[in-house]
Amino acid sequence: MSSRAIKQEVLGLLALADLEQIGDEMCRYAEKDLVNPLFSALSRPEELVRWHAISLFGQVVPRLADKEMEAARIVMRRFLWSLNDESGGIGWGAPEAMAEIMLHHEGLAQEYLHMLISYLRPDGSLAHQDGNYIELSALRRGVVWGIGRLAAGQARELATRGIQADLLPCLQSEDVEVRGLAVWALARLQDGVVEINTGLKAALLPLAADTGVVRLYEHGKIRVVTVAELALVALTRLTLPSGT
């Protein structure tokens, strides 16, 4: 089958409503044959097609890595290059797809997690040049969503790397999506935490009255939720210390 035919079939599958069905159908193709069609889907106008492509990257690239790690690294480097100012592109969907891939492949997470985190960090002094802060709020949404998504399997590692401090400034963003996604990500990072975090509670409390609307992708679906609703969920996940 030609690459053009595969691309058309893949785009058609990504438009389906059932993510599990899409994943099952994609197994008919070799992983390498799916990479370029999935990249092209990230720039499609249909919102759910773009998100489904992000989810499928999290299935396809880990399988590719298990067979040929260097081929998977090339995919990750494509994402990194797309977020580089010198690329001439925008990098739509790149942070989200990177996160989805790393959630499902420990080896790739070990190699590239620091890069995803760096997009929330400004350049520091010469001794701490670990920042690649993304100015464009539309892309920063993707980074924050990616952190929240990774919390499903990498919450402890993210906490060790100080991610909460990176997310807190996002709560003050003028971009409602960045604010809401930061709340969502911080809530997911609290799972399993037993000590109260008074600083985080104080930062979240004002957002419990924020009526801004966020479109949140989870479990293959898009739901519309307010920042206030997300903040209330986050506050309930902040538990009191044992014995109180």
Image (cartoon, helix red, strand yellow):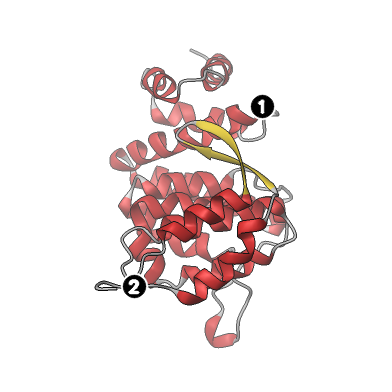
For badge 2, the amino acid type reads: Glu
Q: Check residue 195 in the rendering and tell me which mark sits there, or answer none.
A: 2
Q: Quick one: label 1 or label 2, which is nearer the N terminus?
A: 1
For badge 1, the amino acid type reads: Glu
Residue drawn at point x = 55 percent, y = 56 percent = 231
Q: Position of residue 133 (x, y in %)?
A: 64, 66
Residue labelled with disc 1: 46
Q: Is residue 158 visible?
A: yes
Q: Position of residue 23 (x, y in %)?
A: 40, 24
Instruction: Count every numbered label the image shows and give the total.
Output: 2
Tell whether 7 sits left or right of 72: right
Between marks 1 and 2 in the image, the one whose residue lies nearer the viewer: 2
Give the crowd class for mark 1: few <14, some 14-19, many >=20 residues within 10 Å.
few
Residue drawn at point x = 51 percent, y = 71 percent = 200
- Residue 66 occupies quadrant: top left
Tell whether 66 sits left or right of 87: left
Q: Check residue 238 in the rendering and tell me which mark sits there, or answer none.
A: none
Give the crowd class for mark 2: few <14, some 14-19, many >=20 residues within 10 Å.
few
Between 38 and 169, which is closer to the camera in this rendering? Answer: 169
Residue drawn at point x = 71 percent, y = 47 percent = 89
Tell whether 20 sits left or right of 132: left
Give the residue furthest to the front.
Answer: 244
- Report the quarter where the C terminus lies: bottom left
Q: Secondary structure at mark 1?
A: loop
Q: Secondary structure at mark 2?
A: loop
Q: Is residue 144 visible?
A: no
Structural distance between the alpha carbons of marks 1 and 2:
42 Å
- Residue 131 occupies quadrant: bottom right
